[in-house]
């Protein structure tokens, strides 16, 4: 009875001591700030910073390879905290949100065929650009929703993706996932947007979708002296460095591609779900 | 020649996963992606070989002379667990890239029944130290072969139109069964 107990206890003791010694010998010094920073980071491991997850990012921060601002997800308060831990100044930054530059749902965009293959925008795009007549529009098969780690994209009834601004962290994953390159990160405090990406001429664009931008230049003329909306390739684009402030400009748009979306106010109006 | 037969037996005929049904948990758990399956394979081969040698030594140096062979299971678990910890500590210091690539798989293997099974089997079959090493290596490679094959199939299966009821784990289990049947074809190659 004594021998087996002693043998087992002996083996346990020896391995325990061995491990204790090994822990001392092989101790790896980790910067204590790394843990602190890790606690502050969002922890979604979205990869928006370019590193493999939040732990990797905090290691890069401590080594001085990255700046706190490289994390597109952190809000200003968190960034200031990170700056305090690291002992660096953090400048002000404008919150961005993703915006899908298409509002051509099934009820307004015309179709030329029916795609019934694998339910993914990427595969639909490979087959003649999907079923819509407009080859620039949202395919509505939710590739962006699938990659969003924050549940910030919903598919609305009209079979088109829509970003929920309050949940969006501007990590940029959906921007890369959209085969039509429809998603842009825009400043959340802007109000007027051109929700169309069709660069075809007016007649062709109108034929494809009721809410397309025709490139008619009516909006551009409104800001003739100080161009805040630029027409390029028959498509209007808002210059987000000096966005239009006068909401009346949307009234000149004949199709409604130019619209008002109060991104930062939508947040508050929305019921928490 | 004997050693070669031992390897063929461990890798193909008596494959740990598909013929002996050991280590099913990681077989299903980390086979969703080929890259993680590779990482797991590396870690298993590494730990299995070391564990085989260590448990052989403990058995023949301590347990057998003292007539305490009935303690083998508990001592093997003890040895394997503490050795994995030791390897993890050492790797973190000596080779951070390898440590990072093995990642979570190393501690996971601590409780892998294939590793314990390999140690127990080499003792049961009365292998010499050299035979034990080769057997453990072969068992690890066999585990890896099954895991990598399975991960490859599962990756392709993701893109296939699977009936709704079979999606996910169900079809994975069916696939594992078919794969196991395929490996039964090796039976009789080596006794």
Image (spheres, rainbow, N blue to C red):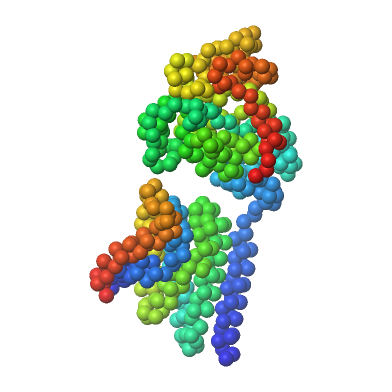
Residue at the image point whose x is 71% and y is 41% from the top: A78
Which picture quadrant has residue A66?
top right
Which picture quadrant has residue B2?
bottom left
Among all residues in the image, which is located at the extreme front?
A107
Q: Is residue A217 visible?
A: yes
Please name whichever residue, B174 or B64, is drawn nearer the observer in this view of the structure.
B174
Please name whichever residue, A90 or A201, is drawn nearer the observer in this view of the structure.
A201
Residue at the image point whose x is 62% and y is 72% from the top: A17
Examine the rendered structure and indicate whether residue A114 appears above or below residue A19: above
Examine the rendered structure and indicate whether residue A169 appears above or below residue B87: above
Examine the rendered structure and indicate whether residue A204 appears above or below residue A97: above
Examine the rendered structure and indicate whether residue A95 appears above or below residue A255: below
Residue at the image point whose x is 60% and y is 9% from the top: A221
Residue B122 location (% of width, % of height): 39, 76
Among all residues in the image, which is located at the extreme bottom?
A1
Left or right side of A273 for B190? left
Among all residues in the image, which is located at the extreme left?
B189
Left or right side of B179 for B94? right
Residue A252 location (% of width, % of height): 60, 14
Residue B116 location (% of width, % of height): 46, 73
On the rendered image, what quadrant is the C terminus of chain B found in? bottom left
């Amino acid at each position: 009875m004594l021998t087996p107990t002693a043998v087992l206890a002996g083996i346990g003791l020896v391995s325990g001591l061995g491990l204790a010694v090994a822990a001392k010998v092989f101790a790896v010094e980790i910067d204590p700030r790394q843990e602190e920073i890790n606690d502050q980071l969002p922890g979604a491991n979205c990869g928006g910073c370019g590193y493999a997850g939040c732990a990797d990012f905090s290691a890069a921060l401590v080594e001085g390879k990255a700046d706190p601002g490289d994390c597109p997800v952190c809000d200003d308060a968190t960034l200031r905290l990170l700056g305090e831990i690291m002992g660096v100044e953090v400048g002000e930054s404008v919150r961005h949100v993703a915006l899908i530059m298409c509002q051509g749902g099934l009820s307004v965009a015309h179709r030329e065929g029916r795609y019934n293959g694998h339910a993914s925008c990427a595969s639909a795009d490979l087959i003649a650009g999907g079923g819509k007549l407009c080859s620039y529009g949202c395919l509505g098969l939710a590739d962006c929703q699938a990659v969003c780690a924050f549940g910030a994209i919903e598919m609305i009834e009209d079979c088109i993706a829509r970003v929920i601004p309050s949940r969006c962290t501007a990590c940029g994953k959906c921007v890369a996932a959209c085969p039509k390159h429809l998603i842009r990160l825009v400043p959340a405090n802007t109000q007027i947007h051109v929700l169309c990406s069709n660069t075809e001429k007016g007649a062709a664009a109108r034929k494809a979708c009721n809410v397309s931008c025709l490139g008619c230049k009516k909006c551009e003329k409104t800001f003739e002296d100080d161009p805040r909306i630029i027409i390029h390739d028959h498509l209007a684009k808002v210059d987000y460095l000096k966005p239009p402030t006068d909401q009346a400009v949307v009234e000149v748009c004949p199709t409604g591609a130019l619209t008002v979306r109060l991104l930062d106010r939508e947040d508050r109006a929305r019921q928490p779900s | 020649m004997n050693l070669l037969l031992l390897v063929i037996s461990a890798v193909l005929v008596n494959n740990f996963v598909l013929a002996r049904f050991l280590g099913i948990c990681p077989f299903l758990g980390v086979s969703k992606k080929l890259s993680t399956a590779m990482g797991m394979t590396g870690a298993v081969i590494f730990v299995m070989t070391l564990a085989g040698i260590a448990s052989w030594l403990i058995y023949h140096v301590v347990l057998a002379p003292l007539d305490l062979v009935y303690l083998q299971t508990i001592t093997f678990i003890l040895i394997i667990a503490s050795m994995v910890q030791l390897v993890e500590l050492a790797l973190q210091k000596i080779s951070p890239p390898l440590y990072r690539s093995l990642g979570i798989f190393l501690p996971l293997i601590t409780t892998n029944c294939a590793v314990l099974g390999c140690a127990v089997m080499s003792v049961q079959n009365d292998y010499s130290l050299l035979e034990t090493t080769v057997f453990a290596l072969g068992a690890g490679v066999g585990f890896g072969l099954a895991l990598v094959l399975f991960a490859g199939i599962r990756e392709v299966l993701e893109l296939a139109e699977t009936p709704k009821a079979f999606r996910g784990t169900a079809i994975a289990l069916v696939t594992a069964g078919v794969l196991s049947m395929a490996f039964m074809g090796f039976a009789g190659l080596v006794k």
